[in-house]
Image: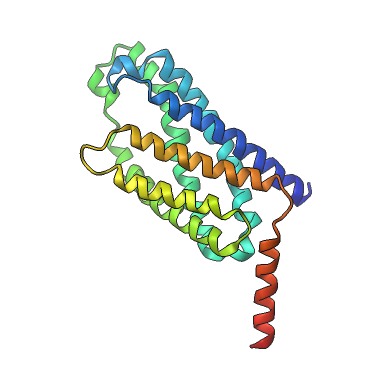
């Protein structure tokens, strides 16, 4: 399979995955609360299936972002990709998967609401790592993208915007809906990467490489 075909497949996966993820986060805005009745509602079940599929497609497409700009982005781009891949796996795949499988299973066995609604203590380290990875992944990938000049710069600035809004969302009395807005903006940025992967390689990246070659020749 040629690299062009691989990039285009990654682009399609990112576009479709991002659209499904946006639909998932929008559906969460209509969930009335975090009680057991809400978490076992048909809306949450269907939304979780959509979010799960979207996240899996995004996981498949994310390597294309790194590979397209790997020479220009360097280690910063690699670290940003790895951190975001883990965040997508944990928050986008594993959490919706539990809503689809384990929560209905527990409720069908008449397990108490406290057990169903309380995450296991063994999740705490993975959750903390996920939050740290989210901040580092967005920041590093945005910096690498701005430096590499392979993808449109607005995708990197959107990632930075999600980071700023995400920090603001931790302030007390800020509506919970702001967290969903962060995820939606991030999905739009990922969709932008996907669309760029469907296009021919951008000239900026080539100029960047030529500039480095000229600098090394004069050194």
| Screen quadrant of the C terminus | bottom right
Task: Tell whether 161 sits left or right of 173.
Answer: right
Task: Tell whether 177 sits left or right of 75.
Answer: left
Residue 130's place in the image compared with 18, above or below, is below
Q: Residue 66, located in which quarter of the rendered image?
A: bottom right
- Residue drawn 24% across the image and 44% down it: 171
Colouring convention used in this rendered image of the protein: rainbow
- The residue at the far right in this view is 2
Residue 150, image x and y in percent? 63, 58
- Residue drawn 66% across the image and 62% down it: 204
Q: Residue 125, located in which quarter of the rendered image?
A: top left
Quick one: 85 or 149, which is closer to the camera? 149
Residue 141, image x and y in percent? 50, 56
- Residue drawn 52% across the image and 35% down it: 55
What is the number of callouts on the image? 0
Residue 33, image x and y in percent? 29, 21
Quick one: 50 or 129, which is closer to the camera? 50
Task: Tell whether 98 sits left or right of 194.
Answer: left
- The residue at the far left in this view is 172
- Residue drawn 43% across the image and 13% down it: 42
Task: Tell whether 136 sits left or right of 19.
Answer: left
């Amino acid at each position: 399979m040629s690299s062009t075909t691989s990039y285009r497949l990654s682009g399609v996966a990112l576009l479709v995955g991002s659209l499904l993820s946006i639909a998932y986060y929008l559906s969460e805005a209509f969930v009335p609360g975090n009680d057991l009745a809400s978490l076992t509602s048909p809306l949450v079940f269907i939304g979780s299936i959509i979010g799960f599929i979207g996240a899996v497609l995004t996981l498949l497409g994310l390597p294309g972002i790194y590979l397209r700009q790997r020479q220009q982005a360097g280690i910063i781009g690699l670290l940003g990709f790895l951190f975001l891949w883990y965040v997508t796996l944990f928050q986008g795949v594993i959490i919706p998967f539990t809503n689809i499988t384990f929560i209905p299973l527990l409720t069908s066995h008449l397990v108490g609401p406290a057990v169903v609604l309380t995450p296991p203590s063994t999740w705490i380290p993975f959750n903390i790592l996920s939050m740290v990875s989210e901040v580092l992944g967005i920041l590093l990938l945005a910096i690498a993208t701005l430096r590499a000049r392979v993808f449109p710069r607005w995708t990197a600035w959107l990632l930075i915007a999600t980071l700023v809004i995400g920090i603001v969302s931790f302030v007390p009395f800020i509506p919970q809906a702001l967290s969903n807005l962060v995820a939606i903006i991030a999905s739009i940025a990922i969709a932008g990467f996907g669309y760029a992967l469907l296009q021919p390689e951008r000239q900026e990246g080539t100029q960047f490489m030529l500039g480095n070659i000229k600098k090394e020749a004069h050194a």
